[in-house]
Amino acid sequence: MSKAVVILGAGASSDFGVPTLQGMFKDRWARQYLKQDPFLAQKLDEIFWAPRGHTLESSDQSVTIEEMLTILRDWENEPNCKESPEPNLFAEFRKRLYVLIMRAVFEGKSTRAAHLNPLIQVCNEKFEQVTWASFNWDCVFDASFWYWQPYAGPGSRLNPSLAISIDNWYGGWSKHLFLKLHGGINWWMIRNRLTYVRFASSGDLEKKWAEYSKTPNCPDQPVILEPSAYKYHGDFYKLLEPQWNKFFERLCEADCIIMIGYSLPEGDAQARSKMMTAFNINKKCKWLLIDPSESTCARFIRLLGQSSLMVLRKGLAGFNSDIRSNLQQAFPNIDFSEAPKKAD
């Protein structure tokens, strides 16, 4: 059997109602948070939107969160700047922005539509090894994988395996490896240990974020790679780095690479490095891009050509409508037909 890598970008979560970084501030829950946090709302307008002729209503046409945090970092790093940022502005702004992001990608979101389940099912059937590489902070893949499995009593469901050690994780299904490359809202550093915080009805995750938002110099921190050009600097990247090494290893040995809604932005220098290098090394591999964005499709066609790459200009839900046929077309050497059901 063959090996697959599935790369999940923001577009893999968009059909579940999770906003992209570009449209984050227009999400209902993000707007609600801005009403509760006048400091963040004021700084967003004062530093980023008003000088560029924008407001909250047109924020999706202005600089993204990644560009905002990069601008602040660059500004702080100018030693001779006469108009330096206020002391601690960056740390406070970033913390409040993280809380807003958590609200936008978690509150009111559900995986009941099960858009990822058909792909998980087919990959489980047809590949001996599946690597799920996510660039998302949300819990969409985690929940989808957990609830895709039938429940047959306590212990009947498992999380996929991980490339790093994390407390409180019910792992691991060795066939499926999960790489949360940028960290996530449910991965935390608690008492100096990387810890998985559950998003179940107990409300553990919401309680943790409430504590973080209200506690100055909170000792527990969400493990998130800062969405800026500086994301690969600092201790959290060192903590997550084994995932990146494994990502490159799996790309180099894959027979099939499926990219869903990932645009390979300029700021993701490590991702670009790993993927482009693996493309040159692993000449037998076939690539499939699933993305409705013309600009994203054009970028990958330019970078990878079209000999090894098939592009489907649609979202995840559209891809699911004929998933086996789409996969068969992209990877003709594998039989994606549905296995006959066993007789009772």
Image (spheres, helix red, strand yellow):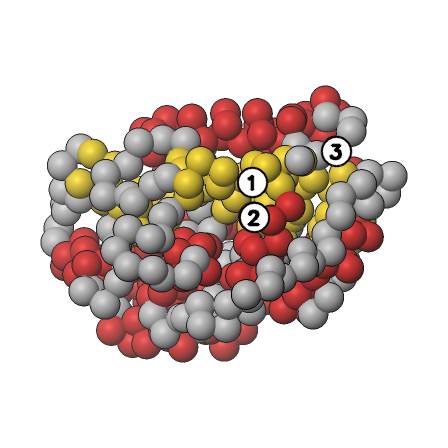
Residue 209 versus residue 60: which sits nearer the camera? 209
Amino acid at dot 1: Val
Question: What's the amino acid at mark 2?
Answer: Asn
Q: Residue at x 28, y 43 (%)?
A: 169
Q: Nearer the viewer, residue 45 or 207?
A: 207
Does any portion of residue 43 appear in the rendered image? no
Question: Residue 137 vs residue 250: left or right?
Answer: left
Considering the image in quadrants, where does the N terminus appear? top right
Nearer the observer: mark 2 or 3; the answer is 2
Tag in front: 2 or 1:
2
Residue at image x 54%, y 65%? 344
Would you say residue 172 is visible in this rendering? yes
Residue 195 lies left or right of residue 157; in this view the side is left
- Residue at the disc numbered 2: 124
| Pointers 2 and 1 in contact (C-beta within 8 Å) | yes
- Badge nearest the viewer, 1 or 3: 1
Q: Along the polypeptide, which appears first: circle 1 or circle 3?
A: 1
Q: Which of 10 and 309 is in front in this view?
A: 309
Q: Mark 3 points at which residue?
A: 285
What is the CA distance from the residue labelled 1 to the residue labelled 3?
A: 14 Å
List the single residue furthest toward the front: 344
Q: Mark 1 or mark 2, which is nearer the start of the sequence? A: 2
Q: In this view, does 293 lie above or below 278?
A: below
Residue 130 is labelled as 1
219 horizontally vs 4: left or right: left
Residue shown at 41% from the left, 31% from the top? 163
Across and down, in percent, residue 21 comes to 50, 59
